[in-house]
Image (cartoon, rainbow, N blue to C red):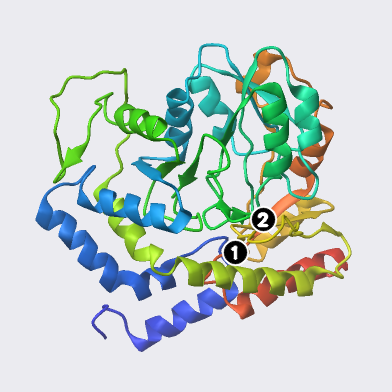
Amino acid sequence: MDRRGTTDEDDATTFQVHCRTVPFFSQAESFARLWPLIEDRVNEVFDNGKFSHGRQVAELESALAAYTGARHVIGVNSGTDALVLLLRACGIRPGDGVLVPAYSFAATATSVALAGGRPQFVDIDPVTYAMDPAALAAAVSPTSRFVMPAHLFHQMADMAGLAGVAARHGLVLLEDSAEAIGMRQRGVHAGLHGAGGVLSFFPSKTLGALGDAGAVLTDDPGTAELVSGLRHHGRLGRTVDDFPTISTRSALPGVNSKMDDIQAAVLLAKLTRLDAGIARRGELAAAYGERLREIPGVLRLPEVIDRGPDSSAVFYVYLIEVERRDELVDHLARQGIGTEVYYPTPLHLQPCFAEIGYSRGDFPIAEAASERAVALPFHPDLSERQLDRVCEAISAFYRGRPE
């Protein structure tokens, strides 16, 4: 038995199980490699005794500003809160229309409702899965005040096209860039093409914490100050050595959305390997593409659209469109292969938005994606052997040899 409390026989069994099953997401190996650095940083948190809104959070904010090029980064406790606080800081008023894609995670639209606005849905581009500029132009109404595209899966929306529509109609441009760390368009990082954007550090994200965490990105100092106050019970003012320089008086009706320092400590450690992880994701995406391209039943593989110089795609998940999607998902599950369906119900058909009045058929491209899209196992710890097993199982399903 070694210092981990396991035997060689235990390790052999673990290896056999690892080969038989392919989880949708795992970061066990990455954590093992990074654990000494994570442990040192977590110990600093305990030694300092400041577990929220402290030195590790401030250091992470500075590191993310350097990585993204943002003038201001404000750490909060989730990507959803980041969206709500950004909308509030940008002056959303009760009933303001916010144009969002019909195909995205629920928080893209629920954040609008939580901030007091009204979601207005827009269909997507079939290749990028992001808001389509032509559809946006057609969807603008007299009550529209904001537009908030979401960058999904592996590349950004057409920000030049969307910004042009926003400018013509006087809309405030925000970005749900929760999935988009590392993505750039013409040298500008996701989240910085308008008034602001966000990052999510949910564990499965490209840069993931041990739990929920998020951040707001902005180049505007006024927006940054308001988000900073709103995340801390509406207290406005700077901090010095972790302690507020102001009293407990709240200038705004804020919330408690401060980032935990332990999450910041983990993220700082993982940030040192972010670019290497992004490169590995690119290699895995290329390998999937080579193996899946000729399989019958696979209708669409991810495409990277050329957005000009200094633009970059980052594969957060590997999403394909297939025939008989739900049958394939069940088949892969029986083979011990994990998948995720992004997104089984488009936003305009979610029960929480029924009162707005949209119907099936209003956004056909989003609805088609919801019926055909599935994400395959994808993370930097995925082995070539595991990837081959996924592709072989998909091929067997569509070639009539499911077992």
Mark drawn on residue 378: 1
Q: Is residue 341 left or right of residue 76?
A: right
Q: Secondary structure at mark 2?
A: strand
Q: Secondary structure at mark 1?
A: loop
Residue ID at (22%, 36%): 238
Q: Amino acid at mark 1?
A: Phe
Q: Amino acid at mark 2?
A: Ala
Mark 1–mark 2 distance (CA, rounded to whole Å)? 8 Å
Location of mark 2 (residue): 375
Query: Which quarter of the rendering shows the N terminus?
Result: bottom left
User: Dot 1 surroundings within 10 Å: few (below 14), some, or many (20 or more)?
Assistant: many
Quarter occupied by residue 47: bottom left
In front here: 183 or 258?
Answer: 183
Whether residue 150 appears in this view of the structure is yes
Image coords of residue 239 (percent x, y): 19, 39
Image coords of residue 390 (percent x, y): 69, 69
Image coords of residue 353 (percent x, y): 64, 20
Dot 1 and dot 2 residues touching (CB under 8 Å): yes
In front here: 185 or 121?
Answer: 185
